[in-house]
Amino acid sequence: MAIASLRYAKALFEIALEEQKVDEFAAKIGTFTSIYNSDKDFSSLINHPQVNAEEKLSLIKKAFGGELPEEVYSFFALVLRKGRESEIGHIFSAFNGLVLQYKNIAEAVVTSAVPLSDSQVAKLQKTLSQKLNKEVIIKQQVDKDVIAGVKIAVAGMLYDATVGAEVHDMKKQLLERPLA
């Protein structure tokens, strides 16, 4: 992520704090990000070099009506005037990270061969919350290449309790042993 993206995200977060609208900004930006990421026509227009900043801002206003706070529209205007539209996804991702940090929430990405049951997710969430001393949001990913077990990425750490990792560790130990 570019340094500029983080600077823009911090500026937007500071505005949200000052206006006491952190939750509102986070929700509205989450909606925008979801549409931006899923509607390729919309994101292509926002990033198109031949569409000027005013037209892009007009498109955003038409698409969202009065749903976005005025401060967010002003933020868009600044980003578009500065030609940073290609960084919008990174800016909002960084903004979301700042919101989670502010609220003492950690996101955990859990990868397994099959979806975890609700009780497994709840137990994992409780365990991680206690270890990290934070509320934890679990995002599940299914990866058919995982034979058994789970990989958990949280708070900048990766815990790999898959069979593949176990086999790799055993292989490494066997290779490091001197032959006797």
Image (tube, rainbow, N blue to C red):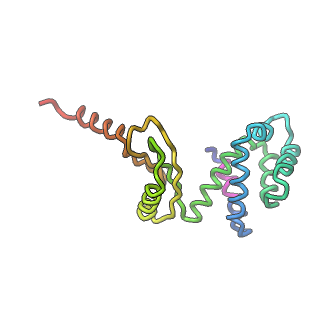
Q: Quadrant of residue 164?
A: top left
The stretch of residues the image draws in magenta is 5-11
Residue 18 vs residue 162, the one in the foreground: 162
Against 59, is 164 above or below?
Answer: above
Residue 39 vs residue 115, the one in the foreground: 115
In percent of the image, x 70 and y 49: which residue is there?
33
* Residue 129 position in % (x across, y down): 46, 63
Residue 7 highlighted magenta (yes or no): yes
Q: How many marks?
A: 0
Q: Quadrant of residue 165?
A: top left
Left or right placement of residue 26 versus residue 155 in this view: right
* Residue 94 position in % (x across, y down): 63, 52
In percent of the image, x 81 and y 53: which residue is there?
64
* Residue 101 position in % (x across, y down): 57, 61
The furthest residue to the top: 179
In percent of the image, x 68 and y 64: which residue is there?
23
Residue 37 highlighted magenta (yes or no): no
Quadrant where the image shows the C terminus:
top left
The furthest residue to the left: 180
Against 156, is 25 above or below?
Answer: below
Quadrant where the image shows the N terminus:
top right
* Residue 113 position in % (x across, y down): 44, 41
Left or right placement of residue 50 versus residue 127 in this view: right
- Give the prevailing secondary structure in the magenta stretch: helix
